[in-house]
Amino acid sequence: MPTLLAFAGSNSSTSINHQLVTYLTTQVKETSFELFNLSDMDLIIYSEDEERENGFPSSIKQIYKHIQASKGLLISVNEHNSNPSAFFKNVLDWLSRLDRKFLEGKKIFLLSASTGARGAIGSQEVVHQLILRFAGEVVDTYAFPSFKDNFSVENQQISNAEINQDILSKLAQFENQLK
């Protein structure tokens, strides 16, 4: 059974992207998954000086090990001013210094979510290009719009039936690609 690593590119304790990824992992049928919470990472901002003087943070080595052990990734990214958060960009910077092609051979279902109507599509587009640069394969994407209107935080599930059907169909197709 293939293993899927799922995480949100956010360090917020109330991340809507983490809520979305968590829900989707409950819908995975034929794939084992590991849910990773990046907000638990203790991570300093990348700099050449920091890398030279102290090496790589243990949290980067840990997420790298999990990425390498997985067949595919389910990633949902947040958006700050039409870009990925500085936190997630920092994670990618550290990982790419550890291994420039840290995503090589990995199939990725890339999501984004926001409270706005565009569903953080700007951030998703930027991260999509970065994934390609780091040798990952984006199999599919989904921009989840108007999170507060389409996701029940109380029930921790997608409340909009059309969106739920669409995203679960894409998730099933993604699972089939992992086989």
Image: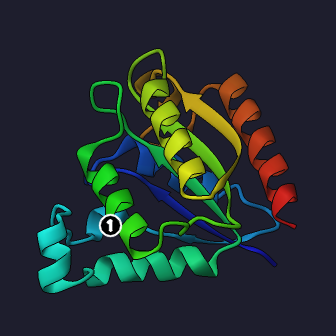
Counting from the top left corner in percent of width and height, residue 171 is at 74, 47
Q: Can you say whether 117 is above or below 37 in the image?
A: above
Amino acid under disc 1: Trp
* Location of mark 1 (residue): 94
Give the image quarter of residue 67.
bottom right
Q: Which residue is at a point 52% across and 56% down the rendered structure image?
A: 22
Counting from the top left corner in percent of width and height, residue 73 is at 61, 61
Q: How is the image coloured?
A: rainbow
Give the image quarter of residue 72.
bottom right
Counting from the top left corner in percent of width and height, residue 50 is at 13, 73
Q: Which residue is at a point 26% across and 52% down the rendered structure image?
A: 87
**Camera-side residue of 171 and 58:** 58
Decide: few, some or many residues near mark 1? Use Cα within 10 Å; few <14, some 14-19, many ≥20.
many
Quadrant location, the C terminus: bottom right
**Camera-side residue of 122 and 8:** 122
Secondary structure under the numbered disc 1 in the rendered image = helix
Report whether residue 156 is seen. no
Report whether residue 56 is seen. yes
Q: Can you say whether 46 is above or below 112 in the image?
A: below
Quadrant location, the N terminus: bottom right
> Is residue 132 found left or right of 148 in the rendered image?
right
Q: How many marks?
A: 1
Q: Can you say whether 143 is above or below 177 in the image?
A: above
Q: Which residue is at a point 67% across and 27% down the rendered structure image?
A: 163
**Camera-side residue of 16 and 123:** 123
Q: Which residue is at a point 80% across and 39% down the rendered structure image?
A: 169
> Is residue 31 found left or right of 36 in the rendered image?
right
Counting from the top left corner in percent of width and height, residue 64 is at 46, 76
